[in-house]
Image: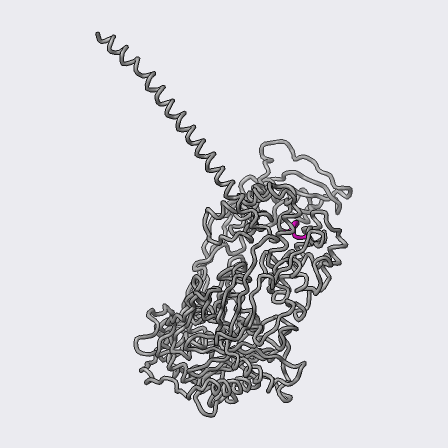
Amino acid sequence: MLRRRRQEAGGKRPRRRIRKLRVAVLLCILGLLALAAFTFGLITAVAAEIPELDPSRRPPTVNGYIYASDGHKILAVLRGSESRTLVQTKDIPFVMRHAIVDVEDRRFYEHRGIDLRGIARAIWSDARNQAVVEGGSTITQQFVKNRYVKRERTITRKLMEAALAWQLEQRWKDKNRILTAYLNTIYFGNGAYGIQQAAVTYFGHGAAKLTLPEAALLAGIPADPAGYDPVTNPRAARERRRLVLETMLAQGDITRSDLLAAGRSPLPRPQDVHLPGTEGPAQYFVNYVKQQLVQKYGSAQVFGGGLRVRSTIDLDLQRLAREAIAKWLTVPEGPSAALVAIDPRSGRVLAMVGGKNYRESQFNLAVQGERQPGSAFKPFVLAAALEQGIAPSTTFVSEPTLISLGDRVWSVHNYEDEYLGPVTLETATVQSDNAVYAQLTRLVGPANVARTAAALGIRRKLNPYFAIGLGADPLSPLELARAYSAFADGGLRIDGAALGNRPRVVLDVRNERGRLVRDGGNAPVLRRVLRPETVTILNGILQEVVRSGTGRRAALADRPAAGKTGTTENYGDAWFVGYTPQLVTAVWVGYPTRLTPMLTEYGGEPVAGGTFPALIWKSFMESALSARESEPLPFPTAPTPYASTKRVVWRDGQARLDNGNCREGMDVAYFSGFGPATTADCKPNEVEVPSVVGETLAAAERRLAEQPLEAAVVYRPAEPLQRTDVVLAQYPRRGRLSSYDKVTLVLAKPLDGRVPRLVGLSISEARAKLRAAGLRVGRIRFGDGPAGTVLSQQAPAGVAAAAGMSLDLVVARGGAAESCPPPAGPSNRVLRGRVK
């Protein structure tokens, strides 16, 4: 009975397995059908997109417009054809095709739209460098990405782009057609889309006439149009062109002589680089507006998308700005000027002068001009100090200053080597004292200064070095004007609701039907970046700069004004940045294409911030404020908070309270509730501990005695062949001690003696000396010299020996060098080691 039940139970198992197998097969069939349906649907969807990629079949575009702030005056027409002209393959020379293929996709003619080998190479290169240094996209993929109208950043879009690239290669088949379409659509910088427009923009002729150096330059630009712009970054553009030429040489498309000749070819002159037919009353401003729009909405929607863009420019103020510059800079070959005016209450850029003539040069001095601001940067240091509670009544000593940077010393001096002696921070600001501001930068901390400037709207990365406080990092007039706007507006930075932390040059963006587009309302967004108390004190000090300091020539007759001059070393750049509660203006004066000292341009005297820049600023501000019918307004005032003095010292990268033992401490007046929270651990009669590791004991003792410190010597067993006359380690390694404290020096002590000096001895004397030291002779080689004399030894004299070690010798025999084996025996083991 039991056996029968087992048989019945066993008979059911095959049926269950059969059912499971049938279900698995059915699921596989359904999965295959689903995959086939998905693949068919994907191919069908992708195929429907292919006609949209052909530049010659693009749909009709709708003109867009950029208006002045009144919403009526047209500043520019945004045509789809404005910056792109299609050309045929035959109109693109082979040298241009080779250049772009070699540098962008050298396997373009081998792959089928997706280059798996290139992707793997890019992944490996990025992983090896721990950064994105190489891309894996093919030219076909890049073309699809540029032309694909769906701009959302999703995995689906990425898959569609890859699928489109593969399908495009299958449908079009002709590689030259794809390459031509790519060259007709990519962006080459300076407003030029497509190879034809790029050739005209940079070289003044069509694509068919491109030469090797011209083609190599253009081929290098699309990877980073701003970074490789020959106008703004000529050095990077030249290096990029060289890379393209070297790649073409490696691919066998040019010869070495071609490369050398093309590498010597000059870059296009900045004044010759421009789009044809550009004109208008504010072209530098318009070009900057276009840049913001393209970054936000993409070139396809901006050019030909029918946008109606209302900008912030006030054309009356734009005219007054040019008139103010022309009034004071009357020599055509003399310095140029850039000017930016901003309404601090709304963040609107009202005027922008970026150069003398847009037709001659599209380089925007107001935006792209990066020059050291000099003392015009000092208000940011002052703001950082006030935010830390440092009162302007703090006294510094104006004198030639040396600031330790660890391994070197920074020497700071004032212009004309004139010093004020003990002086308050307020007076030092009014008189623009470099020596005091170098000390203040150290007290506040360079990194804190950089963070304050960034909070005020300086978007470029600033180096947190001590020289930052004297304006060593280059900035543009637009950046300075925007950052100063927060001073004029009570410590508030104004961003745009749509375009974010950028100068506000766009009021709103609408479509051709007059409706706001996505994120089209760029309303002002206020962000507090400074305490109101900080701004009140800072404004009071900067008003004194205009009343009685370096900016006296900028003083306005009927209203209070604040500002700061800036003059770089050797008078290469001159600045005045100033403001009233209603208007902020930054003025730069200098030579636009080179850093040339302006030593005699101001009536035979140097051009400083208080000369031409201050005078231009005053002329513009008086006429602009009158034109806007702005009533004179005072800056808000408030009682100065109570301050008490604390003794502080700069230590370990920050200010700390003096514990009574610190050297080079200073008295700093802090507002109530502010000041360092930690106390320095200074030692009585403190000195720095020098590093003497690697020096001989005698030299180390002399160096320590100079501090003065004392040496305590300890030993550790020496390794074979290790030097015993140098310091191996010290405790403490670095830091500070009191005078005459001990520094422990570690030396090696040989336990089996030292290697004796054998050079110059006879071979018998050498054997005897080694035997006395418990050592033996190893292999002997022979060389020229006095017969029987030891010429060299394997280990240098004085290093640690090891018991029973053997030394190889070179002995003179008077003939050609030979060698002989050592005598047989176990004692002839050669101990080899490394001298330490």
In the rendered image, residue 102 lying in the magenta stretch gets the answer: yes
Position of residue 13 measured from the top left corner of the image (x, y, whole percent)? 31, 16
In the image, which residues are magenta? 98-103
- Name which quarter of the figure residue 832 lies in: top right
Count of all numbered marks drawn on residues in the image: 0
Q: Nearer the viewer, residue 103 or 532?
A: 103
Q: Main secondary structure of the magenta part?
A: helix
Q: In the rendered image of this protein, does residue 253 appear above or below residue 288?
A: above
In the rendered image, residue 62 lying in the magenta stretch gets the answer: no
Evaluate whether residue 120 shows in this view. Answer: yes
Q: Nearer the viewer, residue 199 or 809?
A: 199
Q: In the rendered image of this protein, does residue 377 appear above or below residue 40?
A: below
Q: Nearer the viewer, residue 37 or 655?
A: 37
Q: In this image, 246 relative to 835: left or right? A: right
Q: Nearer the viewer, residue 800 or 166?
A: 166
The residue depicted at 27 percent of the width and 14 percent of the height is 9
Position of residue 409 measured from the top left corner of the image (x, y, whole percent)? 52, 71
Furthest-bottom residue in view? 557
The residue depicted at 47 percent of the width and 80 percent of the height is 584
Q: In this image, 245 relative to 369: left or right? A: right
- Name which quarter of the figure residue 598 lies in: bottom right
Q: How is the image coloured?
A: one colour
Evaluate whether residue 833 shows in this view. Answer: no
Position of residue 16 measured from the top left corner of the image (x, y, whole percent)? 32, 19
Q: Which quarter of the image is occupied by the N terminus?
A: top left
Position of residue 275 measured from the top left corner of the image (x, y, whole percent)? 63, 67
